[in-house]
Image: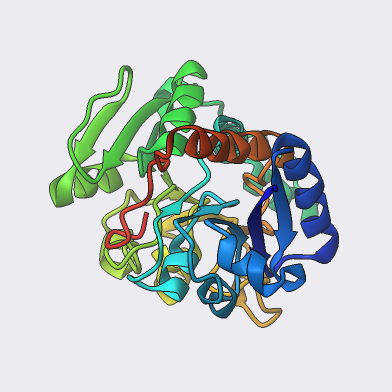
Amino acid sequence: MKKPIALVTRIDRADEQAWVAILARLLPESEIVHFHEMDDAQRDAAEIAIVANPDPGHVAALPNLKWIHSLWAGVERLVAELGQAAPPIVRLEDPELARVMAEAILAWTYYLHRDMPAYRRQQAAAIWRQHPYRRPGDLTVGILGMGLLGKAAAGKLTAAGFRVTGWARSPQQIDGVDMVSAESGLDRLLRTSDIVVSLLPLTSETRGLLDARRLSSMKTGARLINFSRGPIIVDVDLIAALDAGHIAHAVLDVFDAEPLPPTSPYWRHDSVTVLPHISAPTDRNTAAVIVADNIKRYYATGALPAAIDIKRGY
């Protein structure tokens, strides 16, 4: 008899079916069943739930779960909704996602480095004006968050010739990167970086991290890229810094509310580029292989994959 694995999501039905199809192919000895299609016996027998924005009530209705595998890299919503009593949660750590994110960071760093926002404004006003060229080595890119994604981004940026400073929660060393930590390191990164990139997880410590005080400590004319989570930035403080010209431009891919409401001032701000959360989409093919391998290993050895720290939130 195949072991049932619950798929618990609040995503599009076609998306769900695509996940079921690929996971079923990779896990032929298991039965991937959408929560709504499980009978009572299957819900009782399920030791593993594969989830994407699950309804907490549905997860709670699986009484014998040993662990949960998220299909996303970000798990803060999952932690908040399931609470401290949740079974161990395994987040998706996909090298392909890190590669795609690093690719996006390099692309949008070039966008800012080569003054594309200024040329966009000039086109709208029919102005023909060339801006001086700056070599990548003339700029410092500061990365907030040096996990898997931050390391991949730093590798792309240093290979392209940019100077890179990285800020991590605790001290670490990465070849070619000026690593800093603690509050003093954060202050130095903000003070010395021409472009600041946020890749931080959303936790109680990072929520509102980039507020008026920290934004004002950035270089005058610095640029900001947020590819992590919207609430890390205090929106009204960023708007004020942009209006004052202290921050020259912000590329924002994540927001407190998504989709971004039509009333948001970000849509119409001349110094903001709005992206619809596209910096690093999950690749279903590579992600499913990682999920399946973790599950096969668990059934073969009984060992759970490395789980997140519920208290930290990542």
State left or right for residue 101 relative to residue 126: left
What residue is shown at x 68% (from left), y 71% (from top)?
259
Number of residue marks: 0
Give the vertical position of 38 relative to 142 (above or below).
below
Q: Is residue 176 above or below residue 23?
A: above
- Comparing 60 with 300, the one in front is 300
Furthest residue to the bottom?
A: 263
Q: Position of residue 131 (x, y in %)?
A: 60, 34
On screen, residue 300 versus residue 200, left or right, reads: right
Image position of 25 with respect to 224: above or below:
above
Q: Residue 310, percent across and down?
A: 32, 60
Whether residue 111 appears in this view of the structure is no
Query: At which x and y percent is residue 95?
Result: 55, 30
Determine which quarter of the picture holds residue 53.
bottom right
> Toward the viewer: 55 or 153?
55
236 or 72, which lies in front?
72
- Residue placed farthest to the right in the image? 14
Question: Which residue lies at the image location 55% right of the left edge and 80% below the top edge?
Answer: 57
State which quadrant residue 216 falls in.
bottom left
- Residue name at image x 33 percent, y 70 percent: 84
| Observer able to see residue 14 | yes
Side of 91 relative to 283 (left or right) = left
User: According to the image, what is the colour scheme of the structure?
Assistant: rainbow
Q: Is residue 68 left or right of residue 194?
A: right
**121 up-or-down from 156: above or below:** below
Residue 113: give x, y in percent of width and height: 54, 35
Q: Can you say which quadrant of the picture contains the C terminus?
A: bottom left
